[in-house]
Amino acid sequence: QQQQQQQQRLVAPAKPCRSDLVEIVDPRKIKPLGKGGSLKSRMAICHSLAHIESWAIDLSWDIIARFGISQSMPFGFVCDFARVALDEASHFERLAERLKAMGGSYGDFPAHDGLWESAVETSESLMARLAIEHMVHEARGLDVLPQTISKFENGGDKETALVLRNFVYPEEVTHCAAGLKYYCYLYVRDHAPKQDGKDTCLRELEGLAIDSMGGTQAGDILSKFGFNVDEVIASFHSTVRKHFHGRLKPPFNDEAREKAGFTKTWYEPLATK
């Protein structure tokens, strides 16, 4: 009873407190960012990325506050997503510094809050939150980042390209890996039948480093203990179809996704032509 009362007191806010620097508009009112050929276009792209990172910070803390205690998640869950939050804060600071170096600042362009709309859609389900925010949106970021880096390089902005290539890109792989790791963890804990080795499997999943980058992955651990990975993937497909209202369009960055343990069988069946 005491634990229930504590959980009732620890309710995440409906929406994080946000800066009023940025004018929030309907996504349909956002002007095209351009291809990076002009300074204004590169500033707009950099600003858009910074805004995404600002929401990624809040989403990382929100998943801890909203689900950590209520879903009885292990301490490793808190540690992993606190690390993700730190990464996202670093990305925001670096991009804001680049924007300042271009002669602008965060707040110079309007933006939309589409990422938070997905968070609202998944506020009642941790598996849905992991699937949509970390295994759809984060993975989509991996798909488009190489082209974004090229835009800055082709526009002569080597410094911003370096920030994206050396810091943002590799760390976003680990964020996608965190989503997949805990989606698998929850499936085994809450939906898989009781069998020998289940508790050991959960401990190994919790201890899995999200920056293993092509080493042992969550799917490998499930297979090691005899759990059907195809059933977990089918669950993911069902979750995405229920909670994601956009389209998953190729091309996909298969190499980066695979480093996160996110192989083609997870996402290709969901793709629209």
Image: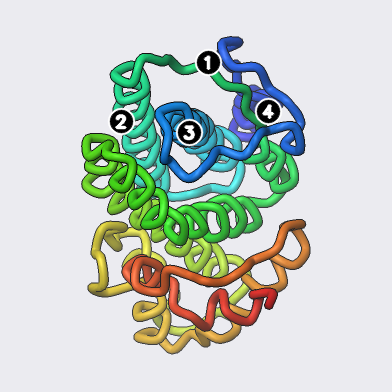
| 240 sits to left or right of 173 | right
* Eye-nearest disc, 2 or 3: 3
Asked which secondary structure carries label 4, the reply is helix
* Eye-nearest disc, 4 or 3: 3
Residue at horizontal 46 percent and vertical 17 percent from the top? 106
Query: Which sits earlier in the primary sequence, circle 2 or circle 1?
Result: 2
Residue 109 placement: quadrant: top right
Question: How far apart are the two marked residues, 4 and 2, measured between alpha carbons?
Answer: 32 Å
x, y percentage for residue 198?
Answer: 44, 76
Asked which secondary structure carries label 1, the reply is loop
x, y percentage for residue 25?
Answer: 73, 25
Q: Which residue, given by chain and number where applicable, does mark 2 sit on?
A: 90
| 177 sits to left or right of 188 | left
Question: How far apart are the two marked residues, 2 and 3, measured between alpha carbons?
Answer: 23 Å
CB under 8 Å between discs 4 and 3: no
Q: Residues within 10 Å of mark 3 (few under 14, many from 20)?
A: some
Question: How far apart are the two marked residues, 4 and 3, measured between alpha carbons?
Answer: 47 Å
Q: Which residue, given by chain and number where applicable, does mark 1 sit on?
A: 107
Residue type, numbered disc 2:
Ser
Residue at horizontal 41 percent and vertical 15 percent from the top? 104
Asked which secondary structure carries label 2, the reply is helix
Compared to residue 86, the image places residue 241 above or below, namely below
Question: How far apart are the two marked residues, 2 and 1, measured between alpha carbons?
Answer: 18 Å
Point out which mark residue 8 bears. Answer: 4
Point out which mark residue 41 bears. Answer: 3
